Amino acid sequence: LLTGFGAAAAAPKRGGTMTVSYQNDVSTLDPAIGYDWQNWPMMRVLFSRLLTYKPGTTDLTTDLAQSYTVSPDGKTYIFKLRPRAKFGNGDSLTADAVKYSYERVVDPKMASPGQAFFHSIKGYDEMVAGKATHLSGVTVVDPLTVKVELSQPDATILQVLAMNFGDIVDPAVAKKYGKDFARHPMGSGPFMLKEWVPGQKLVFVRNPYYFEKGLPYLDKVVFDIGQDPLVALLRLQRGEVDLLGDGIPPAKFVEVTHNPKWKSQVVVGHPLETSYLTMNTQMKPFDDVRVRRAVNMAVNKKHIVRLINGRGHPTDQVLPPGMPGYDKNYKGYRYDLKKAKALMKAAGYANGVSTELYVYNTDPNPRIAQAIQADLGHIGIKVALRSLGQAQVISAGGTPKTAPMVWSGGMAWVDDFPDPSDFYGPILGCGSAVKGGWNWAWYCNKDIDALAAKADTLAQPNEVQERLALWRKVFGAAMHDAPWVPVFNEVQYTMHSKRVAADPANAFSDPGVFPFNYARIYATDGK
Amino acid sequence: MVALANNVVVHLARHKVSTAAALVVLAMIVAAVFAPWLAPHGPNIQFDNGLTNSGLPVPPGRVFPLGTDLMGRDLLSRMLYGARTSLVVGLAANAVAVFIGTVLGVVAGFVRGIMGAAIMRFTDLMLAFPALILAIALAAILHPTLWIVIAVIALVNWTWVCRVVYTQTIAISEREYIEAVRSLGASPLRVVLRHLLPHLVPTVIVWGTLGIATAVQLEATLSFLGVGVQPPTPSWGNIIFENQAYFSTAPWLVLLPGIAIVVVALAFNLLGDALRDVFDPTSRSRS
Amino acid sequence: MRLLDVRGLSVAFRSAGRDLSVIEDVSFSISRGEVVGLVGESGCGKSVTAMSILGLLPAGLARVTGGEARFEGADMLTLSARELRALRGLRIGTIFQEPMTSLNPTYTVGYQLTEVLKIHRLAGSRRARAAAAMDMLQQVGVTAPERRMGQYPHELSGGIRQRVMIAMALIAQPSLVVADEPTTALDATIQAQILDLLRNLNDRIDAGILLITHDLGVVAEFCQRVLVMYAGRVVEETTVEALFARPRHPYSRGLLDSTLRLDSPRSPLPTIAGSVPSPGRRGAAGCHFCGRCARAVARCRVDVPPFSDVGPLHRVACWNPVP
Amino acid sequence: MIGRYLGRRLLLGVLLLLGVTVVTFILLYLLPADPARMIAGRSATAAAVERVREQLGLNLPLYQQYLHFLGRVLHGDLGRSYMQRVDVSTLVGARIWPTLQLMLASIGFELLLGVTSGIIASLRPRQAVDRIAMVLTFVGVSAPQFVVGIMLLYVFAMYFNWFPMGGYGSPIHIVLPALSLGLLGSGWYSRVTRSEMLDVLSQDYIRTARAKGAGPWRTVMIHALRNAALPVVAMIGMDIGYFMSGVVVVESVFGWPGIGQLMWQAIQSVDAPIIMAITMVSAIAIVMGNLLADIVALFVDPRIKLR
Amino acid sequence: MNYLVEVSELEKRFALRGRRTEIHAVRGISFRLRPGETLGIVGESGCGKSTLARLLLRLVEPSGGDIWFDGEDITRLPRQQMRRRRRRMQMVFQDPFASLDPRMTAGQLIEEPLIIHRIGRRTERRQRVAELLEQVGLGADVAELYPHEFSGGQRQRICIARAVALNPKLLVCDEAVSALDVSVQSQILNLLVGLRRGLGLTYVFISHDLAVVRYISDTIMVMYLGQVMEYGPVDAVFSAPRHPYTRVLIDAVPVPDPTRRRHRTLPIGDPPSPETPPAGCPFHPRCGEASDVCRTTVPVLRPAGADLTHTVACHLYGASCAADLSPILPVAERVPVT
Ligand SMILES: Nc1ncnc2c1ncn2[C@@H]1O[C@H](COP(=O)(O)OP(=O)(O)OP(=O)(O)O)[C@@H](O)[C@H]1O
Ligand SMILES: Nc1ncnc2c1ncn2[C@@H]1O[C@H](COP(=O)(O)OP(=O)(O)OP(=O)(O)O)[C@@H](O)[C@H]1O
Ligand SMILES: [Mg+2]
Ligand SMILES: [Mg+2]
């Protein structure tokens, strides 16, 4: 959920170009593969999918699908496609393309990181095992009708289809380029890729066939690749860049946000994110719930938020605010050193204990880790830091009995889709407490797992409230076991130039990290 | 020995610059060794008044003579403690590198033949070898200690020294006095130790002192990759590395440790020059 | 007007913060067509004398502390660097002792030869310069000059290298040639060839030559006048004939006595007892030689002997000259 | 003659390349980061990860993996990036030319600044100029690349507006990045030039040149410099290898699409195919750099003979 | 009588890096030397004199032939044992400045051979150094000075003191006095003669100054392009030089007497490059008396007249008795020096 683009000027006009800066090259534009915060919003405008979110909200709405129906048992979905949807090259978008696209993600040869999201579709297991070449659960009823059958009810399936993994690709182009489709993407989104110079720039231009008339506003979006965010900011201030893809660099944050000249151009984003500290429940001393609770009480979250110049809000629970199921009334562990010390003593660590904290080595994470280190020092936990590259931290977290504590910052859990289940299974569920998994607390409570499984079968629209209540219970129970210290929900800041504007209500496609809806940003006269 | 010590003293007395350099080096070493007594605060204490309300570091002033860092810690104290790591790295690691480079360069240049060629090809190999990968691998396998840093820096830096020493050795070993000493019946070891190495001193000083600064910086990179000292342990290199993006908001965090590095490297260079004058009677009359 | 007229030249070296006087009050002159020998013990200041005239003393270390050196009327010691450069190579040619180290190893003979012409803008075109250089090589007796022009110094034998040096010194037809031990490193046959060559060339271009050597045989065969130096001072100046027939300074005498000849008897050689005082230990007062001199009188220790005439074209600095 | 020499050097180069790839390959193998897991995604099941591992051949023993790698390389196939799933040759290839350009320009600046200051310092040893050059050398060697780069941008791009704020394309874009690398690296050249020049300036042939009437410019630039050039040339040879392995900080400050940023990202995410490819590129650069230096040395100093 | 040095068919070829040719610096040289005898070697610059000297001490490895020293073949001794032999054979090098380590004082330099061969204790060594300094006429008080503080002549004396410190049997002097002016040269020659008398030293004395060689040698060897041209007792060679090269060499020596200036016949042209030696007699391109046989056949050493100890390698001296000559020639009895 983002705010900003406050200067919504007169009526949006058509035409113009915008330049977006990014430091790192875009890894891929293949929607079956792309899975990072940088390529995510790009693919959202290169492709369209059956469903999407109402701009800037967590509410699903139709996109390529004109309408859809759900069977009462919650296992069969029938989608009617827009009749005149076309790919950027003029090819018509039919039900075959939908089936092809879904199968492409599930196809083991693709090795798509999104594969598992489709697990509830009928025929998934056969295809994954290589026994079938097609997904039996996806059938083409007629050129404009697709039927999706599930093997069991799945409350998240619509969210999955709204992810980029549900993007519809042009089968002809995808077959032509094979693995290189990533560099020659072809979809039915508002923009299409015109040029990609590795390490330098990408150019998106208007898709003339885009089904929603009047969109996009801009003729062209240029992604300028390779420059440090600090320099990108300078360039924006000089008017060479229109949007900071990497956000305002922390080093300039206070300077920019306190300067009346720039303040109005700051865009604030509230991604559905929680930054947390995991404690490995299989390792001493964190195998003792009292120690984990003591840690929860000893971390000074306010101080940490001050360290990062207020770019976040302290939190005590797993789910971020804005996420369905967030519990406004939840009372977690409060900062209380006395109690924490008592707990440590009770756990038999009156004389202190040593442990390690793994942290991703880019600012501000090592600083946050140092603050935690100092905090835990107060209750006799001597923490040694291991500040490493992202890949190594992830790998250590996913290796049994290796990382006693991991600070999630920089790799923190941002939603795949705005549903509480996404914050349980992959990071707290028993199924992910395995080698290579993301459950770095190695937390596994079978009872809670059962509750969660039950919640996910409640797929009917009238069961929503019941489901959310169940989820609140799940997270409440998990926090009772305290495998984590939820520390803060990040607030992200970026900047746009005065040459571009957007209606704040629909400038963002969905609540990810800077998920700009490039289709709805328009050029101004620069005042 | 006494005569040499005497030489050194006489020389220092005569040259103000070298004296100043010696004092600087001494001061740095004292600072490192006595950091706990000299530092006004602990290096890792995060002061509440060490950060402004918006979370920015405090510039140098009355309370914190050199200002604070991004965590509200006293920069002076951190620099004093940081001198420990940085001096060890800048001197020890660099010394190891210079030592290995010199030994291998001398052997390759003096013995030549197959042995010399093998050493030089090995040097090429090490030069081409991606040291950062090694660092990451070590970081993953071992627990970070200063020893690994020293080892990695030595491993990276010796190659350049080796190449330079190699060429120099070839040039020197073709001089006639080396042959003259051999004609006296001196063993190769004696020739190398007594008659070759002293002539390499100027080269080694140039590369050794330039290496101080690069070693200190490399240490920061290695720390970043998880091999070296881990936060919150300070070193001059990692103070700069962590804060360089804040250069325009808090310049003291980069400038002060930077100056410290330059001053130490310079002081050692000047001291090296002085040392060379003591060892090289021919250069004394020139100054 | 004399070609070169040196008066009271003194040079000091800076060493360990002190000025050490290396040559003191050196005076002599050379006319056109004349060959003047400069002999003396090793370290007495022969090279320093020559270099200070040319303004080639090591900068920062050595300093001329007094005197003048008039070349064709202009005082070389007070000329600006630019004026001095205009004389060097063009009006004054120099031949150095060690031909291997005095030629730049990285340039061809041709380049180094034509460079003189280029610096002084003597021959218009590149081709004219090359022609002049080849002609000069021919004159100094180098065979196949075209081939030599393209060779590097290390590809030449010592004799040819020295000829190249000579060609370089003479190519601009200078009126003064300073030759600092030009044949010391060569064997007798090549030495003889080179001296012959110098003499022949001199007959043609009529230059004055200052020849520094320690070989009295060379002096006897080649020079017309001789200067004998000792410990930074000129102690005797006379014609070659007079020197060999009747040296007046005890040091010159000693030098001649200790000279070996092919027919010298195999008896112990006469020598001058003691050794030359180094510049730091000469002492300011008196004659520098008096410590080693059998003829020393009391005054020698106190006063510097004046350089006075003892005969036609014969001057000696001694309180008690050899009769 | 030169043909045989080149042949032998290139053969040695190939051996070196093999050595470097073997060592790097082993190190990457030892790294605990699991590429299969990273490809399969954070929600993948163990079975899915295992399938990916099989697809990539990561389940084979190390030596077989290496032989496969070697076989592919011999067929001109550098593999596909784990993270970007694109041909590594495309990714690396696109960055080689910009890297080469930056390398040439930086070495140009290093030489310009370093050799000039070294010469000036050597002409007045231990005097003010020399001392100033020495201090600047150490400041340059100690200065963080990032800070130097940003400062240059502030001054020459922001304030004076003489140069663009980074980017790639026209020749003018290369000035600031090359200048910052030149400022940082010139110290080494300066010191080496100085000590070498001090040596050469005391040689007899310098006196000869002066005796010919050569002015200070000719004496220094034509007679002394060429003789002092060999160590400098050797350093350029080593520098080529350094630059071809990428200069990540300066590249990112100036948005230069060089190899360094790619390597840095690859190292951070343990993208082995890219790391292997760049390691090979820089190893080749080192071999070629040293060879080039040796060949240039032949022209600088005619006394040198091929070995 | 025993010989101290016996050299037979000594060869040295230097391979030139990266080229196919090589330099044949020393070509089949043989001679014998009795204890106390002095061999003088003269010849053009670059004819291989220094190489021969280095070969004698095995500072360079011979490419062929043997060297017997003191009754033992040293050509194949292991390096370490060779080092021990060096105590008995020493050398004074051509360039006194280049052959002294500039970082050491005169005292240290002279003491070094004693340290290397572990002779005496510290105080004894110091005493010996003082003695040696006195012996070469420098005075013990200069022990603390560095080479650059000495004049060329004084430096050469340090070299000589260092060389005799070990009481060697053989002293090879490679142009030991060439760079010195006459008065110092005389001092040094007197010193060398004195040492020979006092210690029974054997010298190989290399110089291009014929007057000096004649003064100090018993036997003389004239070399040209790596080969011996003429060999014999010094007085015989100087009074009746046989080889055309010897003759021009002696003729070229300048006479220190201005009244006796004369015109001399000099050899034509320059010495040939050792890389491309001429066929036949190496001297023939410069020889005024060369005939066809000189251009094709290499002459061998043989007696040129009745005196069998005086040999010459020249086609001018009949081939009649060439066959009956052994490769190693008897050496002239020593001519005593008073
Ligand atoms: N660079 C120098 N530094 C200090 N002293 C020097 C230097 N060059 C020459 N001298 C001193 O100047 C004196 C004269 O030296 P010079 O070279 O003129 O002697 P020389 O007569 O040419 O001797 P030689 O016959 O050995 O060439 C010497 O005693 C020497 O100590
Ligand atoms: N190490 C070497 N490598 C190659 N060639 C060499 C080497 N040493 C000597 N030579 C060559 O061998 C030949 C003989 O050299 P040597 O030094 O023995 O001559 P020399 O008679 O001592 O001459 P000079 O009178 O100039 O000292 C020369 O042509 C020389 O170039
Ligand atoms: Mg001289
Ligand atoms: Mg020689």
Image: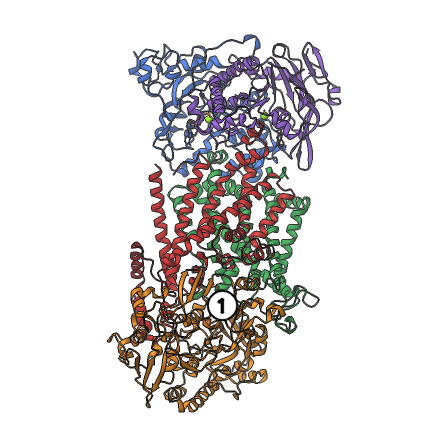
Chain colours: A orange, B green, C purple, D red, E blue
In the image, taking residue A405 as reference, residue E13 lies left or right, namely: left
Of D31 and B169, the residue lying toward us: D31
Please tell me whether residue C130 is drawn above or below residue B69 in the rendered image. above
Residue type for callout 1: Gly
Image coordinates of residue C175 in percent, x first then y, are 59, 18
The mark tally for this picture is: 1
Chain ID of residue with mark 1: A
| Quarter residue C237 falls in | top right
In the image, taking residue D37 as reference, residue C132 lies left or right, namely: right
Please tell me whether residue A130 is drawn above or below residue C300 in the rendered image. below
| Quarter residue B59 falls in | bottom right
Of A511 and C321, the residue lying toward us: A511
The crowding category of the residue bearing disc 1, from other C-alpha atoms within 10 Å (few below 14, some 14 to 19, many at least 20), is: many
> Which residue sits at x=67%, y=34%?
C14
Ligand 3 location (quadrant): top right
* Distance from mark 1 CB to nearest ligand 2 atom below 8 Å: no
Residue A334 visible at all: yes
Image coordinates of residue B228 in percent, x first then y, are 50, 63
Residue D45 visible at all: no
| Quarter residue C122 falls in | top right
**Element carrying mark 1:** loop
In the image, taking residue D227 as reference, residue D11 lies left or right, namely: left
Image coordinates of residue B258 in percent, x first then y, are 60, 57
Look at mark 1 in the image and give the residue it sits on. Answer: A245
Image coordinates of residue A88 in percent, x first then y, are 36, 68
Please tell me whether residue C207 is drawn above or below residue A241 in the rendered image. above
Q: Quadrant of the N terminus of chain E?
A: top left
Of C269 and C8, the residue lying toward us: C8
Please tell me whether residue A351 is drawn above or below residue A230 in the rendered image. below
